[in-house]
Amino acid sequence: MADSYAPLLKAIIARLRGYTGMSAFVSTRIYAGMPQNTEFPCVNVSIDSAPFDGQDFTGMEHQITVQVFSRKPTSKECADIRALVYAALNRQESNLTLDTYSVRHIHYNGIGFIDREPDGVTWQGLLTFRCVVT
């Protein structure tokens, strides 16, 4: 099987950028690797991948990590954006279109937090999702 990492990353970023309400917070500041001097709030997406082989099919299992960053005085904005990310991705297989592959399953795996960064100014929220692509 060819690697579905890049097409999945592209689909996730497109889904988040187009999701209702997201642009009100982050505009198009949804990245796969945040550039230096990024304006806040913003979202960063990363993926870890592993291939698998079944008797009749092959595919990849991906762990998607979505980080949300805000510099408001409280964690509310970070929590609001994190809730939008959850709604946009959790069990939304039909809304993630890949050119050559099919998203069979995507769900929030229960790993997440919101915490203040060591700089004392930035809030970070995190969610992880498990995704199977064939």
Image: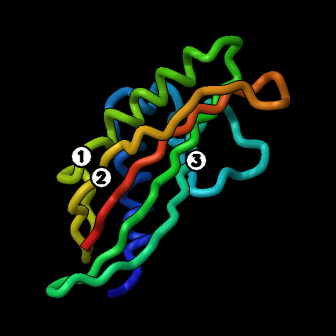
Task: Check disc 3 and give the amino acid type.
Answer: Asn
Rendered location of residue 53, percent (x, y): 29, 84
Mark sitting on residue 92: 1
Q: Which residue is mark 2?
A: 106
Coordinates of residue 6 in the picture (x, y in percent) = 45, 71
Q: Is residue 120 left or right of residue 79?
A: right
Q: CA distance from mark 1 to mark 3?
A: 19 Å
The kind of secondary structure element at disc 3 is strand
Q: Nearer the viewer, residue 12 or 60?
A: 60
- Dots 2 and 1: beta carbons under 8 Å? yes
Q: Which residue in the structure is indicated by mark 3? A: 44
Looking at the image, residue 111 lies above or below residue 56: above
Which residue is rendered at x = 76% and y = 30% of the image?
Answer: 117
Q: Earlier in the sequence, mark 2 or mark 1?
A: 1
Of helix, strand and loop, which one carries label 2? strand
Circle nearer the viewer, 2 or 3: 2
Mark 1 is surrounded, within 10 Å at the Cα level, by few (under 14), some (14 to 19) or many (20 or more) other residues, namely some
Quadrant holding the N terminus: bottom left
Residue type for callout 2: Ile
Q: Residue at x 67, y 51 (%)?
A: 34
- Quadrant housing the C terminus: bottom left
Q: Is residue 88 left or right of residue 6?
A: left
Residue found at x 71% / y 12%: 73
Farthest front residue?
A: 55
Mark 2 vs mark 1: give the one in front. 2
What amino acid type is highlighted by mark number 1? Gln
Marks 2 and 3 close (CB-CB < 8 Å): no
